[in-house]
Image: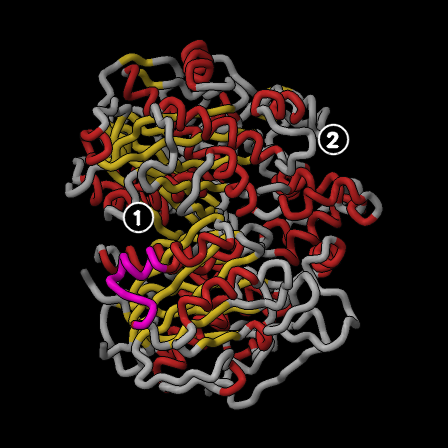
Amino acid sequence: MPNKVAITGMGIISSIGNNVEENFHALIKGATGITKTDYLNTIHKDTLKFGEIKLSNQQLDRKLGLQADHRFPRTSLLGAYAAAQAVERAGIKNINEVPTGLISSTSVGGMDKTEEYFYEYFENEAIRRFILSHDAGETSHQIADYLGIKGFVTTISTACSSAANAIMMGARLIKAGKLERVIVGGADALSIFTVNGFNSLMILTDDLNTPFDDHRKGLNLGEAAAYIVLESENQVQKNNKKVLAYLSGYGNANDAFHQTASSENGEGATLAMKKAFEISGLELTDIDYINAHGTATPNNDLSEGRAIQNVFGKKVPVFSSTKPFTGHTLAAAASVEAVYSILAIQNNVVFPNKNFKTPMKEFDLIPQTSLLEKPIHHVLSNSFGFGGNCSTLIFSKS
Amino acid sequence: MKKCYINGIGCISAQKTFEGGFLDEVEVNTTDVIFSAKNPDYKAFISPGAIRRMAKGVKMGIAASQYALKEANVEIPDAIITGTGMGCLQDSEKFLKAIIDNKEQFLTPTSFIQSTHNTVGAQIALNLQCKGYNFTYVNGAISLESALVDALLQIETREAGTILAGGVDETSGHTLSLYELIGLIKKKDQGPIDVLNPKTPGAVFSEGAGFFVIENQKKSTTYATLEAVGTQNTLQESEVISFIENFLNTNNLKPQDIDAVVLGNNGDVAFDGYYNEAETLFSNTPQVYYKHLCGEYNTATSFGLWTALHILKKQEIPQILQKNQVTKHPINRVLLYNHYRGKDHSLTLLNHADL
């Protein structure tokens, strides 16, 4: 491989913790972050549960040290918080010392402010500073400004696979020698918009989500931000950097089946996994753990299960979905699960697929339901989104 | 490294750009502050039922991409890469308004389904049954350029041989009225708008779609080669010159090697100073402007790129686009520079296909 893609830092904030250690601790303890909402002003607050981060916007402002008149919607608050952790963990002092990019991702951007002030903007001048914070790209600008990045900053939005694609693009730019260092990941805050959108599609459960269970009823929405720092081998050697893991494979494909539903045979997902294997040069048997997309919607888990069988045949590696911990964090999901995949490699552990009871009728795939300790060298992580967007990442031990 | 040829283009804008030709017929509008893109006859590209269902951005994206693919004689590309600053605004607003007005009740999912930023790219893929790589970039005024960076990378590293890349943005009522509220759009009735001699802040807003077939081989339809794309999140006016010089240096060029520079002036008195800075490098170079014809939107550079490709192919710069009186022949290298309100700066370098 001409240019290996090293991961040298990671940062996360999710409903199970405000940093990497807290997230790891919750995963090990089996402590879910799915609760009733404390902050969302929705008529569904008594019937639905969410993977909500228990910090108000004001508390996040203080943690970030922002001025009172800042323009950050919640997505940017979460994004800046997680990205700053990743940069710090990577030991980066002077961010523009080498060409450093930011590729972020989000699905809602500043929607929380837009829905709060939709009509009020016309009467109240003081809040109008948030009008331009609606657009997805602006949240990346805010995160880049917070980190002090001056250079290549862009945003990917492909629904629930967004962060995987941001990570993939970053890796490709490093491999091609276009960037020496890039911060990649995603952020999405809970919003009334997405809650009602998914609710109108009837894919939200009124209980806790149960991936790969025959009686699964749908997903819990969550919010999170997670970023990883990718660096070239050149930077790693020059600065004698500690490498957390390598990004060894990636693939994106389109199901081209339906705007929101996945094909029953999982064609797009199958193609994405196969592409990731091609890039990595790994054998099927090299994969020690699959961190599944596993949203617990009837459609996803069937399609993904079929795709996993298409790729792995009868020898399906140990797999689990961590969505019962965090809920489905949309554009951030793949970067949250990238952090979990790296933690699995670092600690030689498979995190449990909570809430599973009954195997699905359609196949005999059983997820790992308890914490499992075993040597882990390679983790495959799937993320799929609306618009048939299917992405796979493979992480490997350093 | 593989060369990157642009072999087919489709452009929908406030001008008649869709039917072929190169601005043979131009509408100069100096009074309106919002332009609508001219709708082509969508029936040639989309079924009647879908035409009724789809928002304008999706329709423009499908029609422009079909046109480009047909011109390049490509059936199914290896990858589809879309840029959109604001995404599917019309459906987003529709769903959000329904949520607020009906207090989260009686909602149907249709507009939510179509509101995600990657709807245009997904619908193009669905129509073509294209199962390849499908990315959507949403980063303000460099949304299209991010897609071009990606496309260039795919060709250079041989990840793909045929790529459909483009930009699309649609206007929508609520967002336009918010933009008017904060002065992003010029105030009405302040006299004729002169993009080159701005007196007032804000820009004329519009919408459109431009899609480009980018391939690793030259064809009879080739317009030019895409040589390099550079972007930067933010710059001070005083940094513009070094930004451009560094980009040219990286490509082993000097300002005098550029035969035409295409500038994104939008007539905003507060921000067009960036272009004045850039011009100082190109005082002996033909300068081109275009937003007086297509208006401003996050992916308005799709119109600019369409313009630049025609200039290279036809070796002529229509009078209506000329910003200065300098002429140069042959036109072998064209550089585009754009930004929006001091953010999302981009440089795109095109070469004549025979160069």
The chain identifier of the residue carrying mark 1 reads A
Give the farthest residue toward the right. Answer: A123
Q: CA distance from mark 2 to mark 1?
A: 40 Å
Secondary structure beneath dot 1 equals helix
Instruction: State the image quarter where residue A202 is shown.
Output: top right
Residue B105 placement: quadrant = top right
User: Of the residues tagged 2 and 1, which is closer to the observer?
Assistant: 2
Residue position marked by numbered label 2 in the rendering: A41
Q: Nearer the viewer, residue B154 or B110?
A: B154
Around disc 2, counting alpha carbons within 10 Å, would you say few (fewer than 14), some (14 to 19), or many (20 or more)? few
Q: Main secondary structure of the magenta part?
A: helix
In-front residue for pair A261/B350: B350
Q: Magenta segment, which residues? A: B245-256
Q: Which kind of residue does numbered mark 1 sit on?
A: Leu
Instruction: Identify which residue is drawn at 31% across, 16% down.
Output: A349
Depth check, front residue: B7 or A219 = B7
Q: Which quadrant, please, contains the C terminus of chain A?
A: top left
Q: Quadrant of the N terminus of chain A?
A: top left
Q: Is residue B326 magenta?
A: no
Q: Report x, y in % for residue A395.
A: 28, 31
Three-letter amino acid code at disc 2? Asn
Q: Is residue B321 above or below residue B172?
A: below
| Residue A52 in picture, x, y percent from top left | 60, 24
Q: Is residue A166 left or right of residue A139?
A: left
Look at mark 1 in the image and give the residue it sits on: A271
Q: Residue at x 75, y 40 (%)?
A: A127
Q: Chain of mark 2?
A: A
- Element carrying mark 2: loop
* In magenta stretch: residue B253: yes
Please tell me which of labels 2 and 1 falls first in the chain.
Answer: 2
